[in-house]
Image: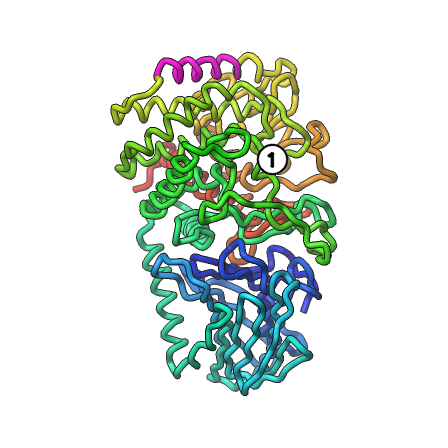
Amino acid sequence: MKRYPLIADHGLVGDLQTVALISDEGVVDWFAAPRFDSPGIFAALLDHDRGGYFRLSVDAPDVTVKQLYYPDTAVLVTRFMSPDGVGELMDWMPPDRTGRPTDRHAILRVMRCTRGTVTFTLECRPRFGFGSNPHETSVDGRTAAFRAPGIAAFLQTNVPLAQDGLYDVHGSLTLHEGGVAGAAFTVAGPEEPAPPLPQPGEVEAALWEAVDFWQRWVRTAHYRGRWPDMVHRSAITLKLLTYLPTGAPIAAATLGLPELVGGERNWDYRYTWIRDGALAVRALLDLGFVDEAAAFTGWLTDRVTERAGAPSAGGRPLQIMYRVDGDPWLPEEILEDFEGYRGSAPVRVGNGAADQLQLDIYGEALYALAQGRGLDIRPTYRGWQAVSALLDWLAKSWDGPDEGIWETRGGQRDFTFSRVMSWVAFDRGLSLADEFGRPAAREAWRAARDEIFTQIMHRGWSERRQALVQYYGGDVLDAALLLIPRAGLLHPTDPLWLSTLDAIERGLVQDSLVHRYDPGASPDGLLGSEGTFSLCTFLYVDALARAGRVRQARFTFEKMLTYANHVGLFAEEIGPTGEQLGNFPQAFTHLSLIMAATTLDEALDVLAPRG
C-alpha cells in the first residue's frame, strides 16, 4: 500500500449526501460522514498514519491493477490481475432516494474471483473526528463495531476478522474462481445497533438497484454531442457532489489537497459557493437536468430571502459560500497533528474566505436566478422583494475594492471581473423585472449597469497589454475574464474582446493549459506557485469556440481530456508534469467541461452539420 497515492489514482462513490474516494489499490482513504462537510473517518490522504483507511486488496507478487466505472454509473470496479488469478472489487454507496438527511451511510464492497485463485486482504482502521475522538472496538465473528462519542460504525463481512491493537481490525480470505464475498462499512448514530446481517442475494440486489438508478438518470440527459462518455461522467460527478436534501452542490469532495505539493495552498472545498452553483445551473440545463437545476435555484432563493432582513457581516446580503444546509458558519481551523498530503501543510478545515467581500457573486446569483425562466420558475413576492433589495444594495456598493473571484489573501483591489459580474447582476435583474412585470428601481439599476460598462472599458483596459486586465491600474491578466462573452458584456467577436483573448493566450496559456493569473506579477498573500487551473482551460475552449476559432478550440479541448484520470475525473489543477493537483474531484472543472463541450458541439455543427 502506497503511503500517498497520486491524487488522480482515485475513483469517487457516493450516496448523494456524502462521498468516498477509493484508490486504484482498493483503499478507501477519504470518507467523511454523515455529510460531505463532516469530520473525516477515513482521511489517510491527509495523514497516512493518523487519518485512517479501509483497504481491500489482493496482495501477491506482480499484481497489475486496473480501475473503471460500471458503464454510466457511480459503481467503481477495481480489478487485480496476478499470475495466480484475477480478483474484482466493486464499490458503491446506495443512493439516497428520500431526500431527507440521515446519519446512516454505507460503503458496500463486493469481492469476486473471476479466474484462478486470489487472496483478499482486509484492513479497517477508522479514525473519528480526524483522529481526535478515540473509539472502542469490538469484534464478534465477522462483525466489528466501532463506537466513538456521537457516532458509531460497523463492519460486516464474509472475511474472518481479528482485532488489531485497540482500534483496528484485519483479516484475509482466499477465493477460488467464481467465489464471491462482501463487506459493508456502515456509519450510524451513536446509539444505533448494528444493521442486520445481509441475507444471501441482498447485496447483489443492492448493486443492481444502484446500477439501475444511475443508468436511468443518465438516460434522461439531452446531450447528443461528440463526447458522451466524458460529458456523462462529468454529470454523474456533479450529481455525486450535490447534497440531495437541499439541492446544494459542493465545490469538491475533499479538503487540504495541495495546489502545489509541499506548499500551503491547501483549502477546504466541501461547501457550496454561490458562483460554482450558479454555473452548475447552466451546465445542468444544457443537459436537460431540470430538477437538479431547479433545486439549487430554490436553495439560492432561500439564501437571498433569509438575508434580506438580516444582512451578513459587513451588511452584505450574501455570503460567498455556505454549508450545504445554508449555515453560514465556516470557521477555519488547522489540523495541527496532520502532516498533510506528502507533507503539504497546514491542513485547513473550514474556510476563512467565507467572510471575504467578493462582489462578483451577485452577478452569478442573478445569472442563476435568470436561468429559472427556462424552468418556468416565477419569483415569489417575497423572493422578488429580496432580489430587489439585493440589487438596491449593490447599486450603492459595486464601485469599490474587494477580494475577487480567486479569494486572494493579499488585500482588496478594484477587480475587473467583479465589475463584469456586477454588470451581469443589473442586466439580468432588469430582464427579470421586465419579463415578470415586477416593481424595481429600473432607472437606478440601468444607470448602474451603464456606468459599470463604461468604467470597465476605460479603467479595466490596459494599453500596454491591449487587453482587459485583472484589476484597475494594473497590467496583470486574469483568466476569469474568459467568461465575458458568455456573460454578454462583449460580443465574442468584438475586436476589444479578441485582443483580450489574444493577450490571455500569450500570457496565461501553456501548451493549451491556462493559468488563473500570475501570482508573481499579482501577489496574492500566499507562498509558492500553482498549476494551471482546469476550469480556466475549459473556459478558454468556450471562448475560442464562441470567437469562431473552432479548430483551435477543438484541439485544446481534446488535449485537455487527456489530463483526465483513468476513470474520467479531474482535480482542480494540472501540475507542470501533467499531474492532478488540488481538491478532487472538482465540480467547477466538470461543469465547465460540460459547458465547453456543448458550446463546441454547436460551433462544430455550424461548420459541418451532422446528418
Could you say where residue 537 lies in the image, as x and y percent from the top left? 55, 38
Q: In terms of secondary structure, what is the magenta stretch mainly?
A: helix
Secondary-structure class at tag 1: loop
Amino acid under disc 1: Glu
Q: Choose between 58 and 587: the one closer to the eye.
A: 587
Q: Which residue is disc 1 drawn over?
A: 407
| Residue 80 is covered by the magenta coloring | no
Depicted 454 relative to depicted 280: above or below = above
Crowd rating for badge 1 (residues with CA inside 10 Å; few <14, some 14–19, many 20+): some
- In the drawing, does residue 313 fall left or right of residue 426? right
| Residue 445 is covered by the magenta coloring | yes
The N terminus is located in which quarter? bottom right
Q: Give the range drawn in magenta.
A: 442-456
At a point 66% along the width and 58% down the height, the residue shown is 46
Image quarter for residue 301? top left
Could you say where residue 18 lies in the image, as x and y percent from the top left? 48, 58
At a point 64% along the width and 59% down the height, the residue shown is 45
The C terminus is located in which quarter? top left
- In the drawing, does residue 81 fall left or right of residue 265? left
Q: Choose between 608 and 13: the one closer to the eye.
A: 13
